[in-house]
Amino acid sequence: MASSWPCTPEMLASFGGSSSSSSSSGSRSSQRNRRLGRNGKWLRSTTSLLGVAAGMALGALSVVNFVGLGHSSRIEEHKHSLRSDKRAKSIAMRAESSSNLPDLWKAGPADVFSGQAQKALYLMKENPVLFEDSVEDSLEKLSEARDDEEKQKKDLEANAKEDTLMLRKRIEEVRLTERTRTVMELLYLKVCRKFQVLKVPLIPALKKGGDVKFGNIDLKALTTDIYSKDALELVRDHLFRIIGQQGNPSFMGGMGVVQIALFQAGQVYAMSAMFGYYLRRVDARFQLEKLAGQFGAFGEEAPEAPPNPFAGDEASTNSLKGYISDFGPEEVQSMWAVTSVEAQMAMETQVTALFGDLRVLKDKLVGALGMVSSPEEATQKLEQAIKKDEVESLRITSDDLRRLVLEAVAYGAILNDNEKQVDVIYELTPASSRAMGALTGDDDGRMLNE
């Protein structure tokens, strides 16, 4: 994600260190230093280091030539040249393979465009300590701007003509769209910043398909570091259920490779992110009710309730899994919904940046499969379509698939945390009637609360 934040000469000069002149420097070096001026100090120090390194390299080469002498010297030089070529090729291959790995500082696969988000992105890279203050300041100003627009709207409605009101309404719609987009980008960057703090770079875009390699990380940062013990058990169940659907039992254990359609991978990520968001909401409510059950209204320890002869296992009743199993259909729908438009857009932005538009991928997949009469036939046709490159696909190992699922679940959970933080400063837009087709791949875009 490239930032367009300006870089001034003063900023470049600040990266240069002060260098003291050597007593052995000649008059020509002094003249050159004066011509370079203050901004040349950094270049001088760098040039000096390169000169020392070059001198050491030439000295070592002279020793080799001196010891070798004659024909043996040329043989040694030839061997040295071959070794250098091999090293150069090895370095080039490692650089090429590492180019596919996610950058350690990079915010995420999605681009941001608003000035406020560009500033926050710059600070995330150059001065992360100021990132949160910058985001909060931007959110406060956006909230004030919205309040001012509401006051102006009320004043105009009392005196303005109908034509003026229509034009004003259109202007307000444009400003609302821009403001919502800006808040979404700031929320997205807050989520990315949390991954940066966890030292887990978000996976790069996978739109091109092909072989996938994310690199090794400590999965502890995506599991025990961000979930309660109760929630972690459900994350583990979700992970095993996803991986178990993609291959045989041996795939779950080692470095087995599976090839899946890009649309399937996008669905796995989107649904796992939704699961993480849902899990965080339910777990917060469960922990709060557990705490409330332990204490009375005035902080006193609550009396022990009489045993229920119709209750099931006490351990399962007191677990998060048992708590969720008691939910009715309406309660499940309410807890599963993404609360705000901005949070839903942030989730869609991440999924689309990684895989592309799931609706387009779904149309292409359905067109390649044609009419099917059974799941077995659909699976067989899908395998043939992947082999013929009629649909985009990924070749992914079990370790990388595990990383993809755990990142998606963590993304949803962290999004829920930061949505609450943003809503304290800037009141977010309720998402009760917004379509979520970009996450489900449905053309009709079913509503969040349906």
Image (cartoon, rainbow, N blue to C red):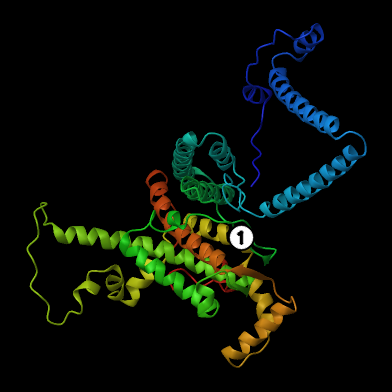
**Residue 375 sits in quarter:** bottom right
Q: Residue at x 73, y 9 (%)?
A: 24
> Does 7 sit left or right of 446 as displayed?
right
- Give the quarter of the figure containing the C terminus: bottom left
**Residue 214 sits in quarter:** bottom right
Looking at this view, is 191 or 334 the one in front? 191
Residue 66: percent from left, percent from top: 85, 29
Residue 221: percent from left, percent from top: 44, 53
Q: Looking at the image, is 424 positioned above or below residue 312?
A: above
Q: Residue at x 55, y 70 (%)?
A: 267
Residue 90 seen in the figure: yes
Residue 429: percent from left, percent from top: 45, 54
Q: Give the residue number, with chain letter if any, for mark 1.
A: 354
Looking at the rendered structure, the kind of residue marked 1 is Leu
Residue found at the far bottom of this picture: 373
Q: Looking at the image, is 343 positioned above or below residue 25?
A: below
